Image (tube, grey):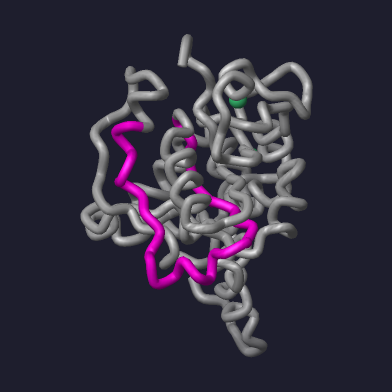
Amino acid sequence: MHTPDAHGWRAAGQRVLAHLPSQCAICRAWPAQRVCDACAARFAQPRPRCTGCALPLPAPGLRCGACLQAPLALQTCVAAVDYAWPWDGILAQFKFHADPGWAAMLAGLMASTPWAGPLLDAADVLVPVPLSRERLRARGFNQSLLLARQLGARKTDAALLLRLHDTPAQSGLARAQRLRNLAGALAVEPLRAPALQGRQVLLVDDVMTTGATLQAAALALRQAGAAQVSALVLARTPPAGAD
Ligand SMILES: [Zn+2]
Ligand SMILES: [Zn+2]
């Protein structure tokens, strides 16, 4: 059924619909943003995390045992949510169903996480964790780049850090072995290294599983001249036993 549209309200409605999907992806409330305010308040409640690797801790501003024992290339790491329901499913929609429409909502979640604001303000450059060329071709877009652009398009530099090759699945390996596997997988583009000297870099990623990739990226950036490297990630895999 068509309603007379003399005043163009239907066009206005379509503009709104382009930005506001009709249902909350979690509770199916309608109409709502992609995640309604109630679900965001319920499922994205900030929690204290290790300042080195973003694992949940009982109190804010602490480092976990592993981070206290092993010196980290990352200055600080902030995560918005746990990589668990409902965010794992939402991230799958974002990544594997080629739905970049999620980027603004998810980046908003990252930016509103405690301690994320100062990191974003202090950063001279936002560096999305890169995909290998093969992975990028298969997926069609780098989800971390989409998030970084939403967090600060003018500061985002996706050409600074390169992923030279993929690494085999890392789960089950010790931290030292994971870092060895990643050595050489991430490198700074030599042509861009001068722009890195003395800069504050903020790495941006969607999911942090063990942190080995972020550590390898931070090492490469520090060795190439960055003054400080921190990370802001959307979701952190919660501890599933010993890591
Ligand atoms: Zn909801
Ligand atoms: Zn830690």
In-front residue for pair 227/115: 227
* Residue 230 percent coordinates (x, y): 61, 46
Residue 179 falls left or right of residue 233: left
| Residue at left offset 58%, top offset 65% | 19
Q: Quadrant of residue 11?
A: bottom right
Residue 35 falls left or right of residue 46: left
Residue 100 falls left or right of residue 63: left
Q: Which residues are magenta?
A: 180-209
Q: Is residue 63 above or below residue 131?
A: above
As for residue 186 lying within the magenta part, the answer is yes
Residue 175 falls left or right of residue 10: left
Q: Quadrant of residue 158?
A: bottom left
In-front residue for pair 219/243: 219
Q: Is residue 90 visible?
A: no
Q: Is residue 62 above or below residue 163?
A: above
Q: Residue furthest top?
A: 241
Q: Is residue 25 above or below residue 48?
A: below
Q: Ligand 2 sits in which quadrant? A: top right
In-front residue for pair 150/224: 224
| Residue at left offset 38%, top offset 49% | 95
* Residue 49 percent coordinates (x, y): 68, 27
As for residue 225 lying within the magenta part, the answer is no
| Residue at left offset 66%, top offset 88% | 7
Q: Quadrant of residue 99?
A: bottom left
